[in-house]
Image: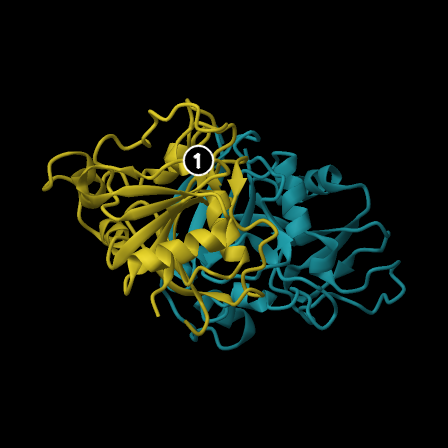
Chain colours: A cyan, B yellow
Amino acid sequence: MPRLRAHSFSLSLDGYGAGPDQDLANPLGVRGPELMEWLFPTRVWQAMHGPADSGETGVDNAMAERGFAGIGAWILGRNMFGPVRGPWSDDAWKGWWGEEPPYHTPVFVLTHHPRASLTMAGGTVFHFVTEGIHAALEQARNAAGPLDVRVGGGVATVRQYLQAALIDELHLAVRPVLLGRGEPLFRDLDLPALGYACAECVPGERATHVTIRKQGR
Amino acid sequence: MPRLRAHSFSLSLDGYGAGPDQDLANPLGVRGPELMEWLFPTRVWQAMHGPADSGETGVDNAMAERGFAGIGAWILGRNMFGPVRGPWSDDAWKGWWGEEPPYHTPVFVLTHHPRASLTMAGGTVFHFVTEGIHAALEQARNAAGPLDVRVGGGVATVRQYLQAALIDELHLAVRPVLLGRGEPLFRDLDLPALGYACAECVPGERATHVTIRKQGR
């Protein structure tokens, strides 16, 4: 059965998946980009943002690469798609990624506000789902067919799918960074009680990569 | 100036320094010993509990070894010394470690209940401090002279010394284990605001070793 996977979820040593005070100027929160500093130098990231043959190979890159293998649809939380919080007053907003987003699959965006689907260059189609995480997953699974579905974030969305025990595999990139405040991943989430355990721990160049799996999947 | 150090503080991936439901049968809490599984096979640990030349060398061992270098006195929280919670009704209790504890220095035990000092074999002398963490540190510094003082734990004691920004160096051994519940280290502790930052991250055989330092020390 195709799986629901989350990858490259960057975490501070003290357990924050985003910094505090998230806003338009700081979509990842204050100091949030420090959590991603393992990803920026990788070939996977560089290829999305520049020439295909630039960027570092290595463990960090290999772990980032894994997250794109066998994915037939994505699910994104509202804030991952954009900073507009109210109803879709500004329908000109087409996500953070310009005309050709890096998904190349259907992408299901969780929101409270209906909006018509949005077809972008390169195969990405944004669909806006107002009926919650289960409906979004069902639509994404239908779209993905035999392939897996990837949850792209943010923290609240990943937490909701974990709390519902719907994520099969979660790859964390733990950075040796202290944030002190922000959006915690694990708080009040009893992952072993939900059936999760650590399956793998691999040191990378700029992060420690831990894979958490639902037991029996 | 001599420093206050904490070493080999074992932490689950989800941030717990001890498991839930700590009691006499589970002094580290349920599943707490899993946090320590990096330490048990090391030569440092084995030498304390058996023949001197048994146990593994390697990164885990080297990190555990560091914690004993240059230490002139220890501070322990009440539960680290023993399971007796009330007044010292049972003065026969001499700690978990038998007649020759592995400290070989003065050890200052935080407690609410006065008790006469206790001289053990091998140089360990337990002193019982009822005046709080600052008094214990002052007494430990006086005893250690030019050497450093080590906080041995448990979680609550390390948290108190961090909150007071008195710890200069904290070595964490992060285990790829999820506990789900237990005694969290970082909760409501804004370490960057207290002047702390990650200084080092080294992968070991069974844990990732992260050293946190007070800036400017």
10 Å crowding of disc 1: few (<14), some (14-19), many (20+): many
Q: Which residue corresponds to the image point at 54% horizontal and 60% vertical from the top-left?
A: B191
| Horizontal and vertical percent position of residue A40 | 50, 70
Place residue A168 in its image quadrant.
top right
Chain ID of residue with mark 1: B
The image shows residue A74 at horizontal and vertical percentages of 64, 51
**Which residue appears at 60% of the width and 64% of the height?**
A102
The quarter of the picture where the C terminus of chain B appears is bottom left
Of residue B181 and residue B135, the one placed in the foreground of this image is B135
Quadrant where the N terminus of chain B sits is bottom left
Above or below residue B187? Residue A41 is below
**Does B56 appear above or below A9?**
above
| Position of residue B21 in the picture relative to residue B145 (left or right) | right
Residue A108, percent from left and from top: 71, 50
What residue does disc 1 label? B79
Left or right? Give the position of A69 relative to A86. Answer: left
The amino acid marked with disc number 1 is: Asn
One can see residue B187 in this view: yes
**Front one among A28 and B103:** B103
Residue A203 visible in the snapshot: no
Residue B189 screen position, x and y as percent: 58, 54
Numbered disc total: 1
- Which residue appears farthest toward the front when viewing the image? B116
Q: Residue at x 42, y 26 (%)?
A: B26
Q: Is residue A184 left or right of residue B161?
A: right
Depth check: give the residue in front, A208 or B150.
Answer: B150
Q: Secondary structure at mark 1?
A: helix
Residue for point 23% across, 49% down: B61
